[in-house]
Image: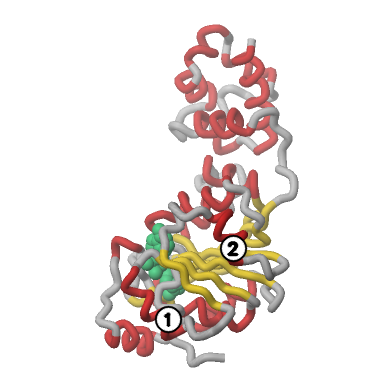
Amino acid sequence: MTDKIAVPSRTREVLAKHGISAKKSLGQNFLTDGNILRRIVEAAHLNKQKGVLEIGPGIGALTQYLADEAGRVVALEIDQRLLPVLEETVGQQEHVEVVHGDVLKVDLHTLFAEAFSSVSSVSVVANLPYYITTPIVMKLLEEELPLEHIVIMIQREVAERMTASPGGKEYGSLSIAVQYYCEAELVTVVPRTVFVPQPNIDSAVIRLTRRTVPPVDVADSQQFFATVRAAFTQRRKTIYNNLRSAFPKEAGAHDMKEVLLASGIEPSRRAETLSMEEFARLSDRLGRLKAE
Ligand code: SAM
C-alpha cells in the first residue's frame, strides 16, 4: 500500500511541487476521491494473476489503486510533463510500467504482446480524456484486443448513450456500435466535484464486457453499421426518409417502403425505436439488393 494521492490537497501539492498546471486540451481532470477509485477498481474484478492497461494515468491516482490489486499495470500517458510525477508516485513498483505515448497512435497488439505475456487476462481501466472518449472506445473494440473488461469513467451523457436500450433519446448508433461488441453496464454516476480541476459536466463509470458472439447474426458487419448510421442521420425523420436519402441508388431501383415492410419494419417508425434484430434484418436485405 502506498500513501494515496487521491485527495484534493495532495493532488494540488503534487502538481505544485512539479510546477504543473492541468492542460484542458488533454482532458486533464484529476480524480481525488478514494471511494470512487475503489468502485472503479472493484468493477474490474482484478487479482494478482491479471493485468491492466490504464489509459491516461495523469499523476497516478487510479494507478496506485490498480497497482494494489493487479499483477501487472501498464500506464500509457501522452503528456511528457507527467512522466517524472508518475515515476515518483507509482514508478518505483516493479509490476508497474509507465509508457509515454498516444493511445490513438500506439500499436496496442504489440504493446499487449510485449507487456502482458505473464498475466492470464488483461482489462482496460481508465478515467478517459473526454475529448477522445469515442475514438478510444471504438479503437479498443474494433481492433479486437483480447480484453476481459473495459472499465472507464467517461462523460455521463456518453455513458448513457453507450448503455441505452431502444426507445429513448439516448439510443443511437453509438449504443448499437458498443453493444454489438459488448455487454454495457452503468457502474456509477460521478459528480463533477470530485475532480481537480472541476470539469463542467458530470461523469459516469461504465463496464464493457466483450461478447463471445455478437448479439445478432449479420451477413456483413460493415453493411450493418452503415445501415444503422444511415437510419439515425436525422433523428426526427422516419426510417424511410433517412434510408431514401442515404441509399439513393437502391432507393432508385427499389421501393424502400417495400424493403422495410419485407424486413418487418413499419416505414413511418423512427430509428430510435428499432431493436438490433430489426436493424440486422434490414441490413441483410439491403446488402442483398446491393449485390443484385
Ligand atoms: N487517471 C488520472 C486520474 O484519474 O486522475 C487522469 C485522468 S485525466 C481525465 C485523462 C488523462 O489522459 C490525462 O492524464 C491526459 O494527459 C491523458 N491523455 C490525454 N490524451 C491522451 C492520449 N491520446 N493518449 C494517452 N493519454 C492521454
Vertical relation: 151 (above or below) 229: below
Q: Residue at x 52, y 30 (%)?
A: 231
Q: Which mark is residue 257?
A: none
Horizontally, residue 84 falls left or right of residue 287, namely left
> Mark 2 sits on what residue?
114
Pick whichever of labels 2 and 1 is earlier in the sequence: 1
Q: Position of residue 87 (x, y in %)?
A: 42, 81
Q: Residue at x 63, y 21 (%)?
A: 287
Q: Amino acid at mark 2?
A: Glu
> Mark 1 sits on what residue?
87
Q: Residue at x 52, y 48 (%)?
A: 138
SS state under label 2: helix
Horizontally, residue 162 falls left or right of residue 210, namely left
Q: Position of residue 244 (x, y in %)?
A: 49, 18
Crowdedness near tag 2: few (<14), some (14–19) or many (≥20) residues, C-alpha within 10 Å: few
Q: Amino acid at mark 1?
A: Glu
